[in-house]
Image (cartoon, grey):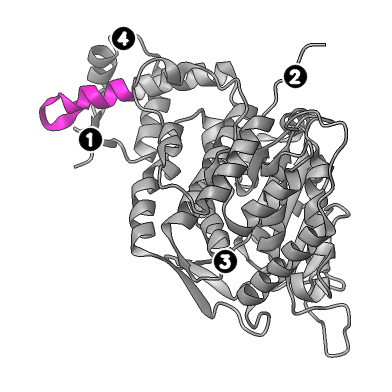
Amino acid sequence: MPREPSLRSANVQQAEAWRKQRAVPTSTSRLEEVAPTDTGDDSDVPMLSPPIATPQMFYGLAGEAGLEAAKGTEVNPVAAMGYYMTMLSAAVGRDLYLSVGNTFHHCRLFACHVGRTSRGRKGDAQGAGKRIRGAIDNVGDELGHHHSGGLSSREGLAGAIQDSKGEDDASGTDDKRLFVVESEFSNTLSQGKREANTLTAALRDAWDGSDIKPLVKHSPTHCTAPHVAIWANITPRELKAMMTERDVSNGFLNRFLFVWAERTGLVPILQRMSDVLVEALAARTRRVVRWARGNYPASQNSRRMVLSPAAETLYKRMYPKLCESNAPERVATLLERAAPYTLRLAMLFAITDETQEIDVKHLQAALAWIVYCSESVTYIFATEEDQAEHRKSSKASDDLLDWLQSQPKRRASRTAVSTECFKGHISKSRLDELLRTLAADGKVKLTEEGETGKGRRKTMIISLPC
């Protein structure tokens, strides 16, 4: 029987590096590679291999939980850590916040574990996290509500953490923390296709932290200021078959961190995490949650998190790359929330250190996760045809911008662009789409000059921004 490729040795090296360093290195080289520059033909090669985790990802308490969960098993530590982080993000509540402009971000994650049937080890990846959660006394009071029965509707989501309808209403709750495990994410995607079903819209509101208020006449169920985190499972075949263009374009799917993770090898006799270790991780988890929760739900948005000066400098440097993914349209759309997710992940790593200051090491760990998730999306969704079309469009954009740079006053007519820049080898529709995209991205400015009448038309001028 041919030997199956294994990442076991890589995971062992990662674990050893993590134990030795106990901090995240400062290199961001892999993030630089997410938006490749003109370095040759390597950027034209489709991503044929799945992403491989780096030591930077396994930071702090969450990293230790993921690595220990994978030890002696076939579980991918990335999936185990992702489950733990999502569970923890649900438990910390809405008292700690990070101000981004006029928006308050709380540490709230939506993540989706993607892997092939039987190879993804999706259930096994949750095993250690479930044991840690189960080892915490009064887990509902400590970590908040938990739901693993699937999602069906806006009303159902709101009902899980609904507002009280009066003093005698025992069905309501002030604690809006909810950790959802959706073992069949295909069910959620299917519900979104049903006429009049507003589940995906409700989930978008939940990620934003906005109120969930279904428009129903009888016995309305409202949820004010929800704090929901979701860990979902799906196979790549189901994901690509069930998702719709609307799910991509309306901002639903890009609210999820897609995590490609499959078994790391073949281990006939699996090891079980010791009860002593489970109890120790549970105690540390409870301590972190109590610190982070503060007086929630009695108080919200009372404790502001901030970036350290060094972390702020790093984030400013990486921000353009987080916002402009050099990838085919679908992949780029699914990565549009890379910047806010970087901050949310950095918040989570800082929280595990029980500090309100996000330092470089927390941001570096977050960036490593963003790289991994970005590579997961590329691996899952970017076909060779998509990449070929993207390369063609990127080259046309670069050619036009370079040509405009060489023109007097850095401007030219649409006719000149067609005949001189592209030598007539571009269709009207393709040029229109190219100009529309560049204008939307603020890379060119479109204006009209001249007068109309007596058979004359205004001339479209394309110019570079000042």
Q: Please give the residue where the numbered disc 3 appears in the rendered image.
A: 351
Q: What residue is shown at x 66% (from left), y 43% (from top)?
A: 78
Element type at marker 2?
loop
Q: Please give the residue where the numbered disc 4 appears in the rendered image.
A: 424
Q: What residue is shown at x 75% (from left), y 29% (from top)?
A: 265
Q: What residue is shown at x 48% (from left), y 50% (from top)?
A: 24
Q: Is residue 279 above or below residue 74?
A: below
- Closest to the observer, 79 or 204: 79
Answer with the quarter of the image where residue 448 lies: top left
Element type at marker 1?
loop
Element type at marker 4?
loop
- Closest to the observer, 134 or 90: 134
> In the displayed structure, does residue 45 sit left or right of residue 7?
left
Q: What residue is shown at x 26% (from left), y 27% (from top)?
A: 401
Q: Is residue 200 visible?
A: no
Answer with the quarter of the image where residue 131 lies: bottom right
Q: Please give the residue where the numbered disc 2 appears in the rendered image.
A: 4
Query: Which residue type carries mark 3?
Result: Ile
Alpha carbon separation for disc pair 3 and 1:
44 Å
Query: Which residue type carries mark 1?
Result: Leu
Residue 342: x, y in percent? Answer: 51, 52
